[in-house]
Image (cartoon, rainbow, N blue to C red):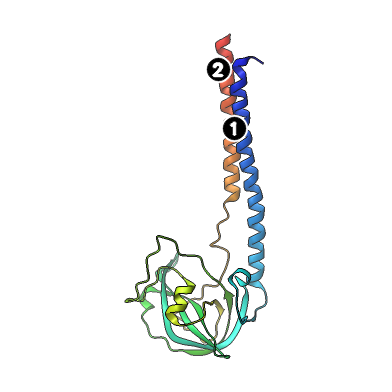
Amino acid sequence: MNRRYIFPFLFGLIGAGILVSLGVWQLHRLQWKEAMLADITARIAAAPVPLPAHPDPSHDEYLAVTAKGEVQPHELHVLTSTEDTGPGYRVISVFVTAEGRRVMVDRGFVPEAGAAAPRDGFATTLVGNLQWPNETDSFTPAPDLKDDIWFARDVAKMAAALKTEPVLIVAKDMPGESAAISPVPVDTSGIRNDHLNYAITWFSLAFCWLGMTGLLLWRIRRKQV
């Protein structure tokens, strides 16, 4: 091979190899993410079990649970929005179990106009899923305690404010709930899975890289003619 071809040929080959390897890595990540989502979906849909005595975020995330007790009127409002209704709040209330434990229940969504409406407590049998949402980062504002507006579900801080265990049950079914509150059961829609798009991007870049390498080699050859 002519020496003028060696460097661009190797540069193109190595570059394309790196891009292809990144695409393959994203395909492996896709398989991992799909398996994780399937596991989460199965946990969400499983038959509910009694609320564990000591729920562990690392083992009990998304666990389907049931508990008898009473929803207390004291609640927190987490700012959010829905595509159909617009701005509103997630209603987080204290739930006192029949055994006397104080945990939290995410009752669902209420439109902004209905957030301040008084809601009485009621006895019920709650069915839902345990969740420890990871919704806060360095840009999340601190809660506006004066107006009772929270900007993310922070289990530890909400538990401290409501004087409960750091345990949140996202309601799926709760007989006696106010018609003004729409349940927002746990699902996997908020878990991003863009690995296929990333893989296609890397493979497309590899194809373009090879095409540009071929064009460069052709231009070198033309100059030699």
Q: Residue 115, percent across and down?
A: 38, 78
Report whether 44 appears left or right of 180: right
Mark 1 neighbour density, 10 Å: few (under 14) some (14–19) many (20 or more): some
The disc label shown at residue 80, or none = none
Res. 177 in view: no
Q: What percent of the width, then of the height, locates residue 90? A: 45, 74
Residue 222 visible in the snapshot: yes
Quarter the C terminus occupies: top right
Residue for badge 1: 15
Which sits earlier in the primary sequence, circle 2 or circle 1? 1
Percent coordinates x, y for residue 12 in the rendering: 60, 28
- Give the quadrant of the N terminus: top right
Residue placed at 44% from the left, 74% from the top?
157
Number of residue marks? 2
Q: Residue at x 67, y 59 (%)?
A: 35
The residue labelled by disc 2 is 219
Q: Identity of the amino acid at label 1? A: Gly
Of the residues tagged 2 and 1, which is closer to the observer? 1
Label 2, residues with CA under 10 Å away: few <14, some 14-19, many ≥20 = few
